């Protein structure tokens, strides 16, 4: 086999390496214990007292993977019973807004009287995002009385029903005022058709068929008008669409207060029982937890949701929070710390009482097993490269995170293809930099 053929075969093997995704992936050997514990706790809560649950763990411990499996299991039993609220995109926006506010304050010395930051607090930004994801995360058919009109396409049967009701109503209305004229019109129309005369139709039958023809014509006209209006941007009966935007009225402090009736109505009409909040801990705003606990209490006190004023079975609305261990740092207070005021001490301990259940997730990747984690993430094709084993022995303990190793693998694969770095160090004339595979991997590590 010639050198060019060997290089070609190596290149084909290299192209066969697939990129690994970074999204959360459920691993039964690491996550099943927490999933079973959460489902068992909820299943045994017959009185509905378990309403605020925390899944606590460090970054990369598998909280999202656990919750995805819980949602999958819940949806398998009761479809549309869970709602996931992700606040990760909002974290960077809040950080940029705070930096702009600090810059303005530094330039001007203090906020001027015309600056309106009173309602643009981190807690209000979080509440606005939660309200938005709740209201726009349900089917518009389930909440027909909502003030938030969303763009959604009508189904074929909805168009048929609307056109049929419109045509029947117009036929009855026109028949009440112009009954004789419409009957004669239908009679003359049917008489003009040659095949009708061959049928032995009585004059009263022709009179009735005239109404049927009118109904068909009105149905066709209603269908065309309905299709045109739905495909165009024309809005009927909706002059002011400002209700579709989320903003606070004068004198209202929070978005939960502003849209409380919408939120309660949404839970009354939908099948949602479990709401999962992710990335709340990124904002360092403990006030949002108090607001959510209060909202949960209001929802569980609603007689329609509990089934007292509804034919549907009662439900318990549960909030599950994926948070980091850092949220509970203030609970560890030394008794000898005299500088800590009594008010702050009480507030720190009360934060521990916020949740009805806390499930702590122990990271399955640590400095002790990070070497094996790195080998599993990189794959056999890469770990078999000469000197890579020694490299992992030296650096794996400093990177105890599986997703980081997956990112290193993906970057290595793409760069090795572009730079023509062969995995087995076969000489490639297009490798102008002269890099070996081990050196390229070390660069990313």
Image (tube, helix red, strand yellow):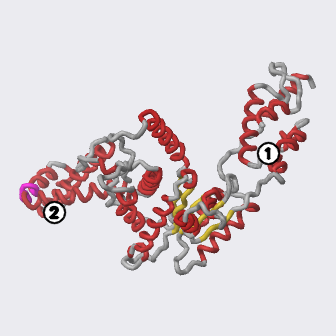
User: What element does badge 2 sit on?
Assistant: helix
Q: Where residue 441 sits: x, y (%)?
A: 80, 34
Choose between 274 and 289: the one closer to the eye: 289
Q: CA gap, disc 1 to disc 2?
A: 91 Å
Viewer can see residue 342: yes
Q: Locate the N terminus by quadrant.
A: top right
Q: Where residue 94 sits: x, y (%)?
A: 50, 45
Q: In this picture, is 429 found above or below 229? A: above
- Position of 81 compared to 211: left or right? right
Q: In this picture, is 153 found above or below 138? A: above
Name the residue rendered at 13%, 54% in the picture.
186
Name the residue rendered at 64%, 64% in the picture.
333
Q: Main secondary structure of the magenta part?
A: helix
- Position of 224 compared to 318: left or right? left
Question: Which label sits on residue 205?
Answer: 2
Question: Which label sits on residue 398?
Answer: 1
Q: Residues within 10 Å of mark 2 (few under 14, many from 20)?
A: few
Q: Where residue 294 sits: x, y (%)?
A: 45, 67
In the image, the segment drawn in magenta is: 178-183
Upstream in sequence: badge 1 or badge 2: 2
User: What element does badge 1 sit on?
Assistant: helix
Task: Check the image and name the residue furthest to the front.
Answer: 338
């Amino acid at each position: 086999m010639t050198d060019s053929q060997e290089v070609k075969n190596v290149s084909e093997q290299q192209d066969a390496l697939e990129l690994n995704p970074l999204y959360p992936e459920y691993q039964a050997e690491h996550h099943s214990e927490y999933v079973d514990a959460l489902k068992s706790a909820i299943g045994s809560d017959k009185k509905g007292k378990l309403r605020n649950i925390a899944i606590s763990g460090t970054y990369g411990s598998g909280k999202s993977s656990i919750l995805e499996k819980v949602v999958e299991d819940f949806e398998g039993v009761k479809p549309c019973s869970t709602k996931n609220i992700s606040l990760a995109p909002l974290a960077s926006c809040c950080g940029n807004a705070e930096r702009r506010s600090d810059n303005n304050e530094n330039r001007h010395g203090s906020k001027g009287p015309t600056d309106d930051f009173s309602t643009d607090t981190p807690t209000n930004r979080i509440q606005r995002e939660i309200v938005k994801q709740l209201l726009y995360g349900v089917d518009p058919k389930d909440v027909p009385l909502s003030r938030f009109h969303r763009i959604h396409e009508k189904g074929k049967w909805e168009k048929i029903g609307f056109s049929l009701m419109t045509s029947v109503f117009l036929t009855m209305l026109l028949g009440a005022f112009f009954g004789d004229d419409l009957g004669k019109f239908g009679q003359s129309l049917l008489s003009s058709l040659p095949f009708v005369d061959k049928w032995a139709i009585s004059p009263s039958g022709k009179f009735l068929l005239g109404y049927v023809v009118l109904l068909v014509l009105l149905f066709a006209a209603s269908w065309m008008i309905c299709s045109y209006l739905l495909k165009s941007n024309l809005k009927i009966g909706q002059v002011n669409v400002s209700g579709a935007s989320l903003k606070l009225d004068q004198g209202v402090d929070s978005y939960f207060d502003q849209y409380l009736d919408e939120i309660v109505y949404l839970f009354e009409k939908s099948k949602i029982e479990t709401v999962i909040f992710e990335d709340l801990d990124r904002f360092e705003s403990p006030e949002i937890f108090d607001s959510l606990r209060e909202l949960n209490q209001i929802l569980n006190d609603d007689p329609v949701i509990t089934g007292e004023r509804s034919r549907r079975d009662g439900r318990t609305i549960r909030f599950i929070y994926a948070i980091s261990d850092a949220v509970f740092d203030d609970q560890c207070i030394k008794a000898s710390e005299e500088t800590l005021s009594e008010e702050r001490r009480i507030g720190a301990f009360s934060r521990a009482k916020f949740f009805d259940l806390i499930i702590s997730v122990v990271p399955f990747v640590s400095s002790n097993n990070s070497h094996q984690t790195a080998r599993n993430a990189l794959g056999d094709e890469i770990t078999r490269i000469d000197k890579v084993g020694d490299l992992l022995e030296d650096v794996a303990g400093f990177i105890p995170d599986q997703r980081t190793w997956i990112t290193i693998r993906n970057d290595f694969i793409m760069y090795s293809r572009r730079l023509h770095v062969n995995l087995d160090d076969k000489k490639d004339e297009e490798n102008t930099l002269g890099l070996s595979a081990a050196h390229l991997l070390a660069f990313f590590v």
